[in-house]
Image (cartoon, grey):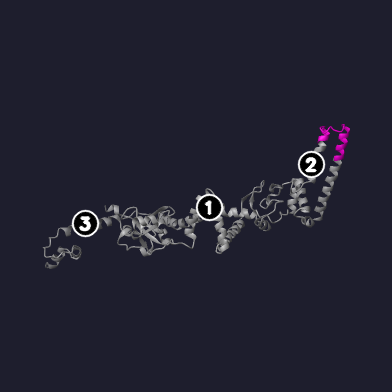
């Protein structure tokens, strides 16, 4: 048994590795929890807010640079003319005045040339139809002329309402900016002005990934709206509006079976007007007498239960370890609840850590309890227990005290027996040297 009591040798490398894990894991877990919470907020709240802001298209479409216009002209003349028409007649009427004189004249000359060609083709088509008897529109020559006229009409009538310029029609360096001929929201306007690109689908223009500025501004606006909503509900008009909305929600099928319970739960944690604050930590005998569990007082019990038992009842929540988000709700007599003078935060630490992180005010002295088990090896505990058994056996074999009306104090006799030196020591002292 002595061999089993020896401590297992641990190499310095293993100790260093375990120490490093003890330092890094709390930080990694904390970062992972915040990242998980942010991912939920980003997907369900922040990005929805960004889309809502983008839907407020109050700014004019983005003006293409000279390089973008040249590239667009090489790719598709129809789309180039559509953009130039918008620049001359549409929302960007002042753009054409700011363009270079050469490009402006070239655009106007191109329109005049297309119109002249269209007129000449129309006259040729009439002559062909007259030669063919006034109605042979299905001949090959007639079909070719009609196709050319349709192409010229497409160029002459090209405009924002007819032609959709895609991001793919622009140079690769322009794919992160807003699509041409589309009105922009406040966020997209700021991003284009600072040349901060978003990741977008080049065919549909759908945003695949937002810029960090989008998330920052949407988060700040969300916080401001929450604060303004809180201030707004302080006055009579704001409370009436909230009550009207809640009345409508509670009358909506399916939603009315979920919303009231969710409201009660969040009001318990965030509302200022709570009958019982969630700051009372206690212990109750659960799951059987003799076993005590950490609990939180969350309510004043049920009226029917108090009238039936004749006792003052309280509602307690017993959290599970190490995940206190799950647990049990129980109704316990108030006189069976033992209140602890610790904070909710300390109680949560105790539950999550499985009892390792106990509050300093509740720590017991190391001579007993679990700390004693951690401070001594198993063999030392066995020897200590063996010594106690021998002392009790020795006390049991002592001669009985005569009945003199005096009740012997076994605990005091046991203490004196433990303090007295062995008989062999006295004999040794009396023996001559």
Kindly state the secondary structure of the residue where label 1 is placed: helix
In this view, 254 is above or below 397: above
In this rendering, position of residue 391 left or right of residue 207:
left
Which of disc 2 and disc 3 is earlier in sequence?
2
User: In this orientation, does residue 156 appear?
Assistant: yes
Which of disc 3 and disc 1 is earlier in sequence?
1
Residue 424 position by quadrant: bottom left
Q: Position of residue 250 (x, y in %)?
A: 53, 52
CA gap, disc 3 and disc 2:
109 Å
Principal SS element in the magenta part? helix
Q: Which mark is residue 151?
A: 2
Front in this rendered view, residue 374 or 426: 374
In this rendering, position of residue 303 left or right of residue 167:
left
CA gap, disc 1 and disc 3:
70 Å
**Does the CB distance between marks 3 and 2 fall below 8 Å?**
no
Q: Position of residue 90 (x, y in %)?
A: 76, 53
Please name the residue that numbered disc 1 is placed on: 250
Residue placed at 87% from the left, 33% from the top? 134
57 falls in the magenta region: no
- Region rendered in magenta: 122-143
**Does the CB distance between marks 1 and 3 fall below 8 Å?**
no
Q: Residues within 10 Å of mark 1 (few under 14, many from 20)?
A: some
Please name the residue that numbered disc 3 is placed on: 389
In the image, which is nearer the foreground, mark 2 or mark 1? 1
């Amino acid at each position: 048994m002595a061999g089993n009591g020896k401590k297992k040798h641990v190499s310095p490398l293993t100790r260093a590795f375990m120490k490093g894990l003890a330092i890094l894991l709390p930080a990694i877990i904390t970062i992972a929890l915040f990242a998980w919470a942010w991912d939920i907020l980003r997907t369900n709240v922040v990005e929805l807010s960004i889309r809502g802001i983008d839907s407020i298209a109050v700014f004019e479409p983005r003006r293409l640079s000279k390089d973008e216009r040249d590239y667009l002209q090489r790719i598709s003349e129809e789309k180039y003319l559509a953009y130039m028409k918008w620049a001359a007649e549409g929302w960007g009427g002042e753009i054409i005045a700011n363009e270079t004189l050469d490009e402006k004249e070239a655009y106007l000359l191109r329109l005049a040339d297309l119109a002249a060609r269209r007129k000449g083709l129309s006259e040729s088509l009439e002559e062909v139809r007259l030669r063919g008897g006034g109605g042979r529109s299905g001949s090959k020559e007639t079909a070719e002329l009609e196709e050319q006229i349709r192409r010229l009409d497409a160029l002459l009538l090209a405009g924002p309402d007819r032609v959709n310029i895609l991001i793919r029609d622009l140079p690769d360096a322009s794919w992160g900016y807003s699509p041409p001929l589309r009105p922009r929201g406040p966020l997209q306007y700021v991003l284009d002005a600072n040349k901060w690109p978003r990741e977008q689908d080049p065919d549909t223009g759908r945003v695949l990934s937002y810029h960090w500025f989008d998330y920052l501004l949407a988060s700040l606006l969300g916080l401001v709206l929450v604060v303004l909503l809180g201030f707004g509900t302080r006055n009579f008009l704001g409370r009436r509006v909230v009550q009207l909305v809640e009345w409508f929600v509670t009358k909506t099928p399916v939603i009315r079976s979920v919303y009231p319970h969710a409201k009660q739960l969040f009001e318990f944690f965030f509302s200022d007007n709570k009958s019982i604050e969630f700051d009372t930590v206690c212990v109750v005998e659960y799951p059987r007498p003799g076993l005590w569990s950490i609990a939180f007082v969350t309510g004043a019990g049920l009226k029917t239960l108090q009238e039936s038992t004749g006792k003052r009842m309280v509602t307690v929540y017993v959290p599970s370890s190490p995940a206190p988000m799950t647990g049990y709700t129980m109704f316990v007599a108030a006189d069976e609840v033992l209140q602890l003078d610790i904070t909710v935060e300390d109680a949560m630490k105790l539950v999550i850590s499985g009892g390792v992180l106990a509050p300093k005010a509740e720590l017991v002295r190391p001579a007993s309890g679990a700390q004693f088990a951690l401070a001594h090896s198993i063999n030392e505990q066995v020897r200590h227990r063996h010594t106690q058994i021998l002392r009790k056996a020795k006390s049991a074999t002592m001669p009985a005290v005569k009945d003199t009306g005096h009740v012997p104090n076994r605990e005091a006799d046991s203490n004196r027996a433990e303090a007295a030196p062995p008989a062999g020591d006295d004999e040794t002292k009396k023996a001559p040297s």
